[in-house]
Image (cartoon, helix red, strand yellow):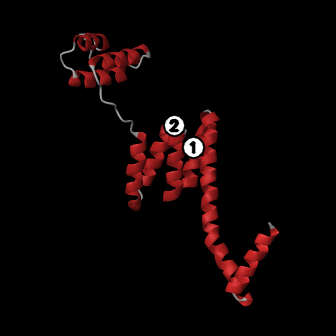
Amino acid sequence: MFRIFSDLGGLVTQAVPAWALPFVLMGAALVALPLWMESVRNKQIKGALRRMLRAEGAERAQLADRALSLAGARRGRLITLIQEAIRYNLPAMRDAGLERLGAIPKAAEHVRALRRRTVREQRALRDPLEAVVRIEALLGEGLTVAAEEELGRALGAFPGDTELQRLRIEVSPPGSP
């Protein structure tokens, strides 16, 4: 292990004169410092979002504000915030990050890519029976709005199906708005 360091030191002293070595090391430190600071901020953002998962009330709001303030208006930090918000299913943080990222002129492509990650693809319905099963499952869970949307898609694909017509009456009975 120590031989690696001695070999590396030997290579550097052969390539760089001894009087220039402090300047080269200073230059390397100046280049590495901003990169290191960015990685520290990204870890702080990730930690704040992770702690948000367990926090409630005022503490959760404080952590959200901290994560947003750490991200500021820096593209890389905002991308990290949004990716972690998507990962931990924090839609409010994701939307706030996307809004801030959208305000940055050169980040339009990042915004489009991150929005694509959040939009769920709707699978095409193969037959009316599949649609009926999906809609009944949504109704069983009490998700009436989602059931109405799914029913609208199914009726568009299979307008003459009697089971779907029956479900239309169940989902939105006559006389309801």
On the image, the x and y values in percent for residue 21 come to 71, 84
| Residue ID at (75%, 78%) | 9
Q: Nearer the viewer, residue 20 or 85?
A: 20
Q: Is residue 167 above or below residue 94?
A: above
On the image, the x and y values in percent for residue 29 come to 67, 73
Q: Nearer the viewer, residue 126 or 18?
A: 126
Residue 22 showing in the rendered view? no
Task: Please name the amino acid that badge 1 sits on.
Answer: Ala
Neighbor class of circle 1 (other Cα within 10 Å; few <14, some 14-19, many 20+) is many
* Residue indicated by mark 2: 89
Label 2 sits on a secondary structure element that is: loop
- Quarter of the picture holding the N terminus: bottom right
| Residue ID at (54%, 45%) | 84
- Quarter of the picture holding the C terminus: top left
Residue 107 appears left or right of 167: right
On the image, the x and y values in percent for residue 158 come to 21, 21
Q: Nearer the viewer, residue 110 or 19?
A: 19
In terms of sequence position, does the residue under pointer 2 or pointer 1 come before the other? Answer: 1
Specify the quadrant of the image occupied by residue 70.
bottom right
Task: Please name the amino acid that badge 2 sits on.
Answer: Asn
* Residue indicated by mark 1: 64
| Residue ID at (48%, 48%) | 97
